[in-house]
Every structure is written in C-alpha cells, then in structure tokens.
Image: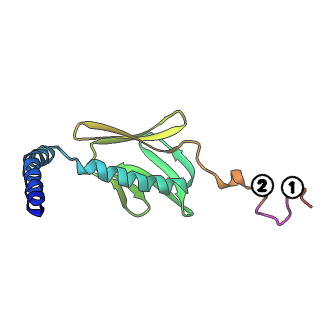
C-alpha cells in the first residue's frame, strides 16, 4: 500500500514539473526595475522627514523647510535630489525634477530614462504643532478659564 502511495505521489510530482519549469521560465523574462523600488523607499523616508518638519515653502525647483531646528532645502543638483545641509541623496540618475501643487498636495515630478514619474510627498498646508496648542509657551498663565 505504501509503495502505491509513493508511486502515485511521484507521478503527480513528475506531471507538475513541466508546468513549474514553464512558470520559472516565464517569470525570469519579466523586466524588473530596481530603481522604482528604491525610489519608493526613499520617498517614504522623505515623507516621514517632512511630516515632522515645519515652515514649508516651495518653488518649482526647490522645497524649503525647517527640520530639527535647522533650515533645510531639497533640490535637484546634477542628476540627484539632495537634501541640504549635508548631503542626503533621495533620488538619483534623474533627467529632470520639479515640484507641483495640486488640490493642496505637493507632488514631486521627475523624469528618468524618458519615463515620467509623479509621487505625492506632503500636504501643502503643512502640519503645525501650534495649531493643537491652546496655551502660550512664553508665559506660565493659562489662556483658558479652567480654574
């Protein structure tokens, strides 16, 4: 009885082997663009950084903000999207890059190898902690009547 089960399992495996080989052969020929995956990871890191930044201003070619109590800028230098001060590279091997605002959202639009990409990076309005505070930090007196 065990011999029959083993032979039946062997026949099933051998019949599925050509289908498996065809699947491997087909998927091996699919183009895979590693730079797009890298771009998404870098832009996710940039979004996280911009989430805690403030005093946002942008033009078509640069984004200015305050991050960690330091003025920072994000712009295309050469063929890379670079954060200053310092040199943190977010996107590389770019042909062109610009920032655009639509419906209150700032998009980074870039071109690489004659393909255009467009990704949302932050809300144009910004996120201000002062909007959630109901007291003045300068003095110790509460500005609400909660006494």
| Residue at image location 90% in from the left, 56% down from the top | 145
Residue farthest toward the bottom in the current orientation of the protein: 140
65 left or right, relative to 86: right
Q: Which residues are magenta?
A: 137-142
Q: Position of residue 8 (x, y in %)?
A: 10, 54
Viewer-proximal residue among 93 and 47: 47
Cβ–Cβ below 8 Å for labels 1 and 2? yes
Which of the colour schemes (rainbow, by chain, secondary structure, one colour) is used?
A: rainbow
Residue farthest toward the top in the current orientation of the protein: 103
Q: Indicate whether residue 123 is drawn in magenta.
A: no
Answer with mark 1 or mark 2, whichever residue precedes in sequence.
Answer: 2
Viewer-proximal residue among 117 and 139: 117
Q: Which mark is residue 134?
A: 2
- Determine which residue is flagged by label 1: 144
Q: Indicate whether residue 138 is drawn in magenta.
A: yes
Q: Is there any visible trace of residue 49 in the rendered image?
A: yes
């Amino acid at each position: 009885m065990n011999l029959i089960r083993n032979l039946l399992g062997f026949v099933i495996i051998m019949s599925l082997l050509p289908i498996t080989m065809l699947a491997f052969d087909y998927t091996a020929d699919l183009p895979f663009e590693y730079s797009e995956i890298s771009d998404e990871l870098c832009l996710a890191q940039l979004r996280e950084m911009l989430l805690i930044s403030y005093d946002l201003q942008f033009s078509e070619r640069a984004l200015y903000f305050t991050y960690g109590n330091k003025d920072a800028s994000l712009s295309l230098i050469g063929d890379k999207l670079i954060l200053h001060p310092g040199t943190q590279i977010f996107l590389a091997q770019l042909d062109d890059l610009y920032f655009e605002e639509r419906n209150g959202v700032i998009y980074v639009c870039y071109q690489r190898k004659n393909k255009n990409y467009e990704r949302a990076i932050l809300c144009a309005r910004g996120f201000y902690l002062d909007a959630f505070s109901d007291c003045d930090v300068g003095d110790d007196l509460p500005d609400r009547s909660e006494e």
